[in-house]
Amino acid sequence: MPILQDVGLLECDLPPLPLIASTQMHSHTPERVAFLEKVGFARDLGARA
């Protein structure tokens, strides 16, 4: 499973694999996690504390 750190990579022709959001995506709010799910991420590693 690819671990992505930039939502801009979604514009690329990626293979149909489940995507994982890296800690570098700063998903520290429920709204951000909901956004990542909406754009196709299957898993979120969460922001670093």
Image: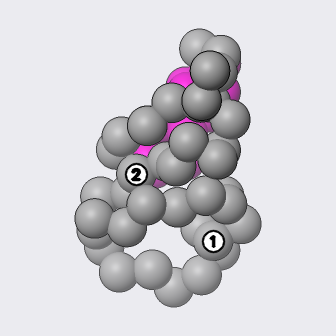
Residue 1 percent location from the top left of the image: 28, 65
Viewer-side residue, 13 vs 43: 43
How many C-alpha atoms fall within 10 Å of the one at disc 1: few (<14), some, or many (≥20)?
few
Q: Does residue 38 appear in the picture of this structure?
A: no
Residue under the point 64% across and 47% down: 24
Residue under the point 59% across and 30% down: 47
Residue 49 percent location from the top left of the image: 62, 21
Question: Would residue 11 be counted in the magenta stretch?
Answer: no
Q: Does residue 41 appear in the picture of this structure?
A: yes
Q: Can you tell which quarter of the image residue 35 is in? A: top right
- Drawn side of residue 29 relative to residue 33, left or right: right
Residue under the point 71% across and 66% down: 8
- Drawn side of residue 27 relative to residue 17, left or right: right
Start-end of magenta stretch = 31-41
How many C-alpha atoms fall within 10 Å of the one at disc 2: few (<14), some, or many (≥20)?
some
Amino acid type indicated by mark 1: Leu
Q: Secondary structure at mark 2?
A: strand
Which residue is label 1 attached to? 9
- Which residue extends farthest front? 49
Which residue is label 2 attached to? 20
Q: Secondary structure at mark 1?
A: helix
Viewer-side residue, 27 vs 48: 48
- The answer to whether marks 1 and 2 mark residues whose Cβ atoms lie closer than 8 Å is no
Residue 46 percent location from the top left of the image: 51, 30
Question: Would residue 32 be counted in the magenta stretch?
Answer: yes
